[in-house]
Image: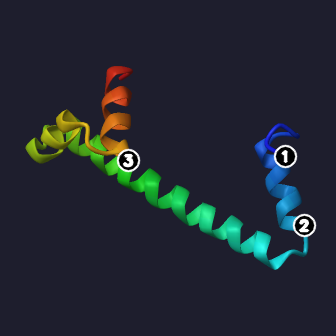
Amino acid sequence: MTNIGSPKLRRFVVDLLPWKNLHVVRDIVDIMHSASSEIFESKKRALLNGDEDATRQVGQKKDVMSILSQSTLLHI
């Protein structure tokens, strides 16, 4: 299913289908995406502002967000 149509089209189809469990999964994915984006952006802001704790965490590379933050900062 991931190769069929655009993400917008797939979302439209999911919204149309009367399948409660699919809608629950959609809502869970939305919450996870929102939370992870918020965490990532706050860590990125902390790094750009020179927060020592955030810099140390990214330097240790012990979590996915730190690795993503480091690779994102290389592209800024």
Q: If you read the primary sequence from the N terminus, does the residue marked by circle 1 or circle 2 appear first? A: 1
User: Crowdedness of circle 2 by 10 Å Cα count: few (<14), some, many (20+)?
Assistant: few
Question: Residue 26: which quarter of the image?
Answer: bottom right
Where 23 falls versus 3 (above or below)? Answer: below
Rendered residue at 30%/30% (across/down): 70
Q: What residue type is labelled 1?
A: Met
- Place of residue 57 in the rendered image (x, y in percent of width and height, measured from the top left): 18, 43
Q: Which quadrant holds the C terminus?
A: top left
Q: Which of marks 1 and 2 is in front?
A: 1
| Residue that mark 3 sits on | 40
User: Crowdedness of circle 1 by 10 Å Cα count: few (<14), some, many (20+)?
Assistant: few
61 left or right of 20?
left
| Residue that mark 2 sits on | 16
| Residue that mark 1 sits on | 1
Number of marks present in the image shown: 3
- Check contact, mark 2 vs mark 3: CB within 8 A: no
Residue 42: numbered disc: none
Rendered residue at 65%/69% (across/down): 27
